[in-house]
């Protein structure tokens, strides 16, 4: 591991707005944020651009960026401290165990921005909109809470639409090309470090918003797998 990464891993241990694999957090997030505001998660947050951006847009809401890579969290956490964004925090943790950190109905919304699309093959179950992850989110997401996906991967976009249709979930918003419109909402105008790397502007950015307040039968997972054996 490089010296810079080691320094950042050490630094976040002293940051008051960062928790690493915390114990006993379900029901205690009000103590961490020191307020009663609702909580929105940014999963696989990287440098936390979305948590920071949303935190500026909505000062009366809390935003928590979650990622396993501490050297990336360092950047977002440091910016939040420098800009006095007390409603923005970060947690280093595995998303596969995200349900262990929150109690029922403790999270209002989830944002998943430019995650690894895990292209066709056996890695399909690692996609953060796969039903095995949606079942984890259901354990702490409020009934009217939303899952928001922003991605430049047509594979992940189509996969998520298939999941929504197969499980008859409520689709709230579907934008195949976010920037096609001249009027982009303030939320969707936030850009991550990864999104900014598309200097030539060739990629389309897709957006989906949906609810998961319905049962997600396990038997449909196999049907999903068969439907997606051949992806384009």
Image (cartoon, grey):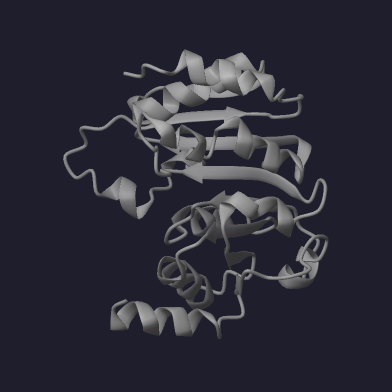
The answer to which of 164 and 192 lies nearer the viewer is: 164
Q: Quadrant of the N terminus?
A: bottom left
Image quarter for residue 59? bottom right
Q: Position of residue 156 (x, y in %)?
A: 42, 30
Q: Residue at x 60, y 15 (%)?
A: 166
Q: Position of residue 15 (x, y in %)?
A: 56, 81
Q: Residue at x 61, y 31 (%)?
A: 131
Q: Quadrant of the C terminus?
A: top left
Q: Position of residue 231 (x, y in %)?
A: 36, 19
Q: Residue at x 33, y 54 (%)?
A: 193
Residue 141 visible in the shown view: yes
Q: Residue at x 59, y 15 (%)?
A: 165
Seen in the picture, residue 176 relative to 94 is either above or below; the reply is above
Seen in the picture, residue 65 relative to 23 is either above or below; the reply is above
Residue 183 visible in the shown view: no
**Label tally:** 0
The answer to which of 74 and 155 lies nearer the viewer is: 155
The answer to which of 147 and 131 lies nearer the viewer is: 131
| 9 with respect to 230 (left or right) | right
Q: Position of residue 164 (x, y in %)?
A: 59, 21
Seen in the picture, residue 156 relative to 64 is either above or below; the reply is above
| 210 with respect to 126 (left or right) | right
Seen in the picture, residue 12 relative to 90 is either above or below; the reply is below
The answer to which of 185 and 133 lies nearer the viewer is: 133
């Amino acid at each position: 591991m490089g010296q810079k990464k080691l320094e950042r891993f050490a630094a976040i241990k002293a940051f008051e707005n960062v928790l690493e694999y915390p114990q006993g957090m379900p029901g205690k997030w009000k103590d961490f944020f020191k307020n009663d505001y609702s909580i929105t998660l940014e999963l696989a947050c990287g440098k936390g651009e979305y948590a920071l951006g949303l935190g500026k847009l909505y000062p009366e809401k809390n935003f928590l960026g979650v990622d396993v890579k501490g050297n990336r969290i360092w950047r977002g956490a440091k910016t939040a401290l420098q800009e006095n964004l007390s409603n923005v925090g970060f947690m280093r943790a595995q998303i596969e165990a995200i349900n262990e950190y929150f109690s029922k109905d403790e999270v209002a919304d989830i944002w998943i921005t430019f995650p690894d699309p895990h292209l066709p093959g056996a890695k399909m179950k690692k996609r953060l909109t796969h039903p095995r992850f949606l079942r984890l989110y259901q354990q702490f997401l409020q009934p009217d809470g939303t899952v928001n996906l922003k991605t430049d991967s047509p594979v992940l976009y189509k996969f998520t639409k298939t999941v929504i249709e197969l499980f008859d979930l409520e689709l709230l918003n579907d934008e195949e090309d976010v920037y096609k419109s001249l009027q982009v909402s303030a939320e969707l105008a936030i850009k991550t470090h990864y999104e900014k790397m598309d200097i030539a502007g060739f990629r389309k950015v897709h957006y989906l918003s949906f609810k998961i307040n319905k049962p997600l039968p396990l038997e449909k997972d196999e049907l999903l797998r068969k439907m997606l054996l051949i992806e384009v």
